Image (tube, grey):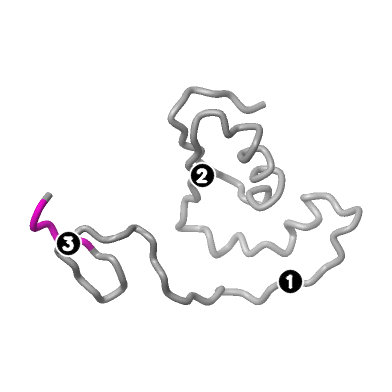
Amino acid sequence: MLGQTFHTFPGKLSTSFESDVFDWDTRSAFNPVRQDIEGRSSEELCRAFPKHLLQEIQPVLKTEHGLLEARVRPQLESVSACLDTLIIVSDVDEEYQ
């Protein structure tokens, strides 16, 4: 892999091994929705989610062994609840519901 070109920052090329962490400011493509969440279902809250922006994007959730209950379930019941399709990749064969 030595001498291979890596794209580490938009418009910047590097031939060395650099961190996979990208440290630049980004802006959301939509304005935040402010709504009362108390007593609302995920379905009601997801109505404001901009699904049209994901037409050509496949969200993927990468997880590790033993994190299903601790991290994946809360992720699926909150942030990822509005996604119609989500690929979950793990280093172990686990089943969720």
Q: Start and end of the magenta stretch?
A: 2-6
Sort mark 2 into few (<14), some (14-19) or many (20+) by Cα contacts within 10 Å: few
Q: Which mark is residue 61?
A: 2
* Secondary structure state at the residue bearing disc 1: loop
Label 3 residue SS: loop
Q: Position of 49 compared to 90: left or right? A: right
Q: Are marks 2 and 1 in contact (CB under 8 Å)?
A: no
How many C-alpha atoms fall within 10 Å of the one at disc 1: few (<14), some, or many (≥20)?
few
Against 45, residue 61 (above or below) is: above
Give, as a three-letter code, the residue at label 2: Leu
Q: Is residue 73 left or right of residue 24?
A: right
N-terminal label among 3 and 1: 3
Residue at the image position 48 percent from the left and 46 percent from the top: 60
Q: Amino acid at mark 3?
A: Ser
Residue under pointer 1: 33
**Precedes in sequence: disc 2 or disc 3:** 3
Nearer-the-camera pick, 71 or 10: 71
**Mark 2 vs mark 1, CA separation in Å:** 24 Å
CB contact under 8 Å: marks 2 and 3: no
Quarter residue 49 falls in: bottom right
- Residue behind mark 3: 16
Give coordinates of residue 59: x percent, y percent: 50, 50
- Whether residue 73 is in magenta: the answer is no
